[in-house]
Amino acid sequence: DAKTTQPPSMDCAEGRAANLPCNHSTISGNEYVYWYRQIHSQGPQYIIHGLKNNETNEMASLIITEDRKSSTLILPHATLRDTAVYYCIVRVGYKLSFGAGTTVTVRA
Amino acid sequence: EAQVTQNPRYLITVTGKKLTVTCSQNMNHEYMSWYRQDPGLGLRQIYYSMNVEVTDKGDVPEGYKVSRKEKRNFPLILESPSPNQTSLYFCASKGAGALIKQYFGPGTRLTVT
């Protein structure tokens, strides 16, 4: 599996967009980028995934660079309930490997 | 409501006393998996099951057993728990196809004294 690198923490103001970077420079052609989040010891929650194209759903947008070596998860209007650990995972197949993630704190 | 349930949610037990943590999903998913989460180590996969009667080891299977006799249930068995199995455990499931998202249960916090 490709290794991912995320900043350990970041703050965001409530109502502003939160941009979470992820580096995956060794990603291979058939590996997808997944994002999950975990709110305070709850079960991880799927957010979004993508292969090459940018993706958007009701929770977030995923921007993948053209060379696929990095991606950015965008929470368009962060709320206090978005405070969580966000995991960027690169994987083909079923198994998910969770690293340390980015602890995002949304401040009022 | 689509969900993965785990029981119990909290358990304190003593070394060597066999226990089972149940996991059930109502989404008719083929794939189910168990993870443990420890501070500084992230989530690590214990066992997974691709379908009924098909199970395989994950990254940290030692000290655990699983069974998959029915599609909806995937219990985690600790035959002789030890203090190093004190952890937060999550069950997850997903449907067929590698791209479908995994659904996680609420977690079981186990303490072995």
Image (cartoon, rainbow, N blue to C red):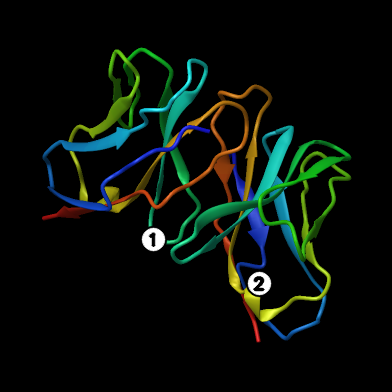
Q: Secondary structure at mark 1?
A: loop
- Image position of A73 with respect to B19: above or below: above
- Image position of A94 with respect to B4: above or below: above
The numbered disc on residue B85 is 2
Quadrant for residue B79, please give it: bottom right
Q: Nearer the viewer, residue B30 or A58?
A: B30
Which amino acid type corresponds to the residue marked 2 in the rendered image? Gln
- Residue at the image point whose x is 66% and y is 29% from the top: B95
Residue B30 position within the rendered picture, expressed as x and y whole percent measured from the top left: 74, 32
Residue A91 position within the rendered picture, expressed as x and y whole percent measured from the top left: 52, 30
Viewport quadrant of the C terminus of chain A: bottom left
- Residue at the image point whose x is 30% and y is 27% from the top: A71
Q: Chain of mark 2?
A: B
Crowdedness near tag 1: few (<14), some (14–19) or many (≥20) residues, C-alpha within 10 Å:
few
Nearer mark to the viewer, of 1 and 2: 2
- Residue at the image point whose x is 15% and y is 36% from the top: A17
Tag 1 residue: A40
Residue A76 position within the rendered picture, expressed as x and y whole percent measured from the top left: 19, 32
- Image position of B4 with respect to B9: above or below: above
Residue A61 visible to an observer of this rendering: no
Crowdedness near tag 2: few (<14), some (14–19) or many (≥20) residues, C-alpha within 10 Å:
many
Residue B52 visible to an observer of this rendering: yes
Q: Chain of mark 1?
A: A
Which amino acid type corresponds to the residue marked 1 in the rendered image? His
Q: Nearer the viewer, residue A22 or B54?
A: A22
- Residue at the image point whose x is 48% and y is 46% from the top: A98
Q: Secondary structure at mark 2?
A: helix
The numbered disc on residue A17 is none
Q: Nearer the viewer, residue B19 or B57?
A: B57
